[in-house]
Image: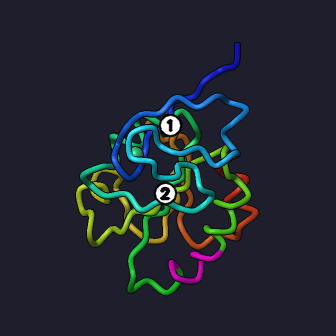
Amino acid sequence: MSTQRHIACAHCGAVNRVPAERLGDDPSCGRCGSAILTGEPVELTDANFDAVVGQTELPVLVDFWASWCGPCRMMAPAFAQAARQLKGRALLVKVDTDANPALAQRFAIRSIPTLVRLDAGRERSRQAGAQAAGAIVAMAS
Ligand SMILES: [Zn+2]
């Protein structure tokens, strides 16, 4: 018997069961067919954040950012690189704080970029300011 992990689809919200040893094999959503755990950051919103983050049994790292924020844009390639390195092991999420004020308020985001590590929807740690890819990987591992 292999262990299964629940992974929520960021596209349609369906909760998929993926065998733990297949998490890195480009699993796709059983409902909508979208790739889940692609190794790329997923954009979440006030509307779907809880459904995806709360139903995904992997460490989640959220990048709270905004398009006008220079350090946020500087960190984006490092965040994407960390997502590739953590493919199948963690879910990396981007939340645009301008477009999603409810999440920014709930997490009390005072400066951006801020990275928040969540396990089963609960905050475990956070870091304000742009981080290098290695530090991002370490935070999500
Ligand atoms: Zn789906």
What segment is highlighted magenta in the picture?
A: 72-77
Q: In this view, does 104 lie to the left or right of 130?
A: left
Q: How crowded is mark 2: few (under 14 residues within 10 Å), some or many (20 or more)?
A: many
Q: Where, quadrant-wise, is the C terminus in this rendering?
A: top right
For mark 1, give the secondary structure: strand
Residue 44 coordinates in the image, percent (x, y): 37, 57
In the rendered structure, which amino acid carries the disc numbered 2? Val
Q: Residue at x 60, y 24 (%)?
A: 4
Q: Residue at x 48, y 41 (%)?
A: 123
Compare residues 112 and 78 and report the one nearer the observer.
Answer: 78
Residue 138 coordinates in the image, percent (x, y): 73, 53
Q: Residue at x 33, y 42 (%)?
A: 50
Q: Disc 1 designates what residue?
A: 7
Q: Is residue 4 left or right of residue 7?
A: right
Compare residues 83 and 132 and report the one nearer the observer.
Answer: 83
Mark sitting on residue 93? 2
In the rendered structure, which amino acid carries the disc numbered 1? Ile
